[in-house]
Each structure stands twice: as structure tokens, then as C-alpha cells.
Image: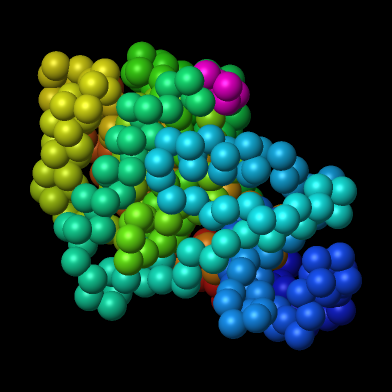
Amino acid sequence: MPTDTAARPDPRLALLEHWLAQDLKLVDSAVEPASADASFRRYFRVRTAGRTLIAMDAPPGREDLGPFVGVARALGALGVTVPEVLEQDRERGFLLMSDLGSMHYLAAFGAGADVERLYHDATEALLRIQARGLEAAAALPPYDAAFLDREVQLFPEWFLGRHLDAVPDAAARALIDRTSARLAASALEQPQVFVHRDYHSRNLMVLPAGNPGILDFQDAMRGALTYDLASLFKDCYVVWPRPRVLAWVGDYRRRALAAGVAVPGDEAEFVRWFDFVGLQRHLKVLGIFARLWYRDGKQSYLRDLPTVLDYVLGATGAYGELAEFERFLRAVVVPRFAAAQARALGA
């Protein structure tokens, strides 16, 4: 069974510190962990000459700096706040960037921040990206049916098969494939826009001006209009009452219409788009969070699985066309879930 990373020599950190000191001449700088994410990237805060910067470690062969740099440039040109890339060494996999601080939305919510103001700012930035970013979106890879399905297939492989020890049989596989196709069709009938893909409370930073600061955008694609909206309001790390979410979604839709973003005239259709793309995302996330433990030894994401599963069941229970899939979840997933969680978290 994998274990979380223990203290051990860190040659990548040593190489990063050498790059900062020797190549960039940041003498007397202090390097400390800033954050890690669900990939192989790591971030360090660099304290030097009375200011702080952020260094990214993206190991070559596992991560490519090119998309991050390109998307950062594109988003900055659209008038939203992203880190400024100051220095880069693509061969060794290092970036040095401006520092957008350490207060992300999730922490701010816990500290009693004004939720309505923060979400208003986040949707304003999202609308700016979608309304102004059509040309930038055209240069991104398409979030097409094949890609959407590959993401959903993480659910039977890692969540069902590995986490629940419930490898799906042929009938279950066929059901999952039909559900995946239905969700992909819903995503592809939407206007295709610039999609961040992880536009949520841990990637949005609270700033005194230009709020929010936007992080972790390197996997951007051209895809469904409501995808980032679902990431934001069906956040895997914080849950809001359904009526409040629907009020935010309705407000976004009205503002999108005013901004010239193509949205359907029927509000119920828009909510269905939002729920279906959220379901696709959360099936993927169930698989990814399980994989992060069983393959990569990152256990902390398991604690967010109950929230994600609740989102899945909320969506499948709301639409009759998903009833067969919900029955499968209630019969196979729900009875095994608590024991699987206890087994994995107690390991």
C-alpha cells in the first residue's frame, strides 16, 4: 500500500536552489514550500531582497512548462490576474513568477470573508475570459467526446476497481459508456469557450486589487460553456445549498447574456448543462482522487471523496434519464463506500 511522502533527499529542490542562486543571482534567498497540486508540479515561495516570488518545479518528462507559459500569456492579455512569468528554464523544468499571495478562496471562506463578493469577482473574471477569449480558445486543444470519455473511464478503473474493489462487469461497463456518451453530448451541444478546467476555490487567490488571482490554468482547453461554472459552484472542497448555487448560476447566465456570451434562452436547459457537465467532472474526480492514493501515494484527497460522491448522487437523482445509472450507484457504490474509505484512510 502506498504511503504519503516521507522526508528524504530532494535533488530537484537542490537543483532549483542552485538555479536561483547561481543562474538568477538571487543571493541570500530563502526557499520554502508554497503548495503542491494533484500533478507532479510543486511550488516554492522564494524570499529575496524584501519581496517574495514563486518558483515552480515541473519535472521534465512528467510536466511541460510550455502550456503554462502560453496560457498565462493568453489570460493576461484578456485582462485577468495571473502570475507573471519572470524567468524560465524549460530544459530543467523551472519557472520563477510573481507571487499572488497565500490566501485562496477556500481559506478566505473559512475566515469569514464575503462569499458573495468573492464569487461575484470570480464570475466577472470568468465572463471576461469567455467573452473576450474566443480567439485564444481557438488555439487550445478541443475538449472533445474522446477526451471527455477518457476522463470518465477513470471512474470504473480507479474508483470502482481499485478503491471499492468492485470491478464492473460487461453490463456495468456498457451502462457507464452510455452515461459517458450522454454527458459528452450535453457538453458538446454547448457553446465552446476557453475552459480553465480547475476553476475552483483552491486555485483562486484573494487579492486587494484585480481579484481573483487565477492559478493552475496550464491544462486549459476549448470546451463547454458551463464547465468552469460547475468547477466553481460544485467545488470539490466546499459545498453550498442548492438554492444558493442555482441563484448564482442564474445570475451568471443573466450577466453572460449582457456580456454577449451565447447562452440558451431556456434557463432549465442551462441548469441541465451545468448539472451534466458537473456530473462528468465529478465522475472523473472520483477516479483521479482514488488514483492519487493508489498510484501516487497522496492520501489527503480521499477525504474529499464523500463530497464528490454526494454531488454525483445529487445529479443522477435529479434527472430521469440518469435513473438507471443512479440505481447502479445505489446498488454497487453506496453500500461499499464507507468500508473502502475506512480501509484506505486507516492504512
Query: In the rendered view of the protein, which quadrant contains the C terminus?
Result: bottom right
At a point 63% along the width and 52% down the height, the residue shown is: 85
**Image quadrant assignment for residue 10:** bottom right
User: Is 52 or 281 nearer to us in this picture?
Assistant: 52
At a point 26% along the width and 51% down the height, the residue shown is: 121
Total marks in image: 0
**Image quadrant assignment for residue 240:** bottom left
In this rendering, is residue 59 above or below 4?
above
In this rendering, is residue 132 above or below 37?
above
Query: In the rendered view of the protein, which quadrant contains the N terminus?
Result: bottom right
- Residue range of the region highlighted in magenta in the rendering: 138-143
Residue 287 screen position, x and y as percent: 56, 46
Q: Main secondary structure of the magenta part?
A: loop
Residue 91 screen position, x and y as percent: 87, 48
Residue 292 visible from this viewpoint? no
Residue 131 visible from this viewpoint? yes
Residue 139 belongs to magenta span: yes
At a point 20% along the width and 17% down the height, the residue shown is: 264
**Image quadrant assignment for residue 290:** bottom right
User: Is 285 or 257 nearer to us in this picture?
Assistant: 257
Residue 129 belongs to magenta span: no
- Left or right: 107 with respect to 269? right
Residue 342 screen position, x and y as percent: 51, 70
In this rendering, is residue 345 above or below 152?
below
User: Is 263 or 150 nearer to us in this picture?
Assistant: 263
Task: Indicate the colouring scheme.
Answer: rainbow
- Left or right: 84 with respect to 75? right
At a point 34% along the width and 56% down the height, the residue shown is: 211
Residue 75 screen position, x and y as percent: 49, 39
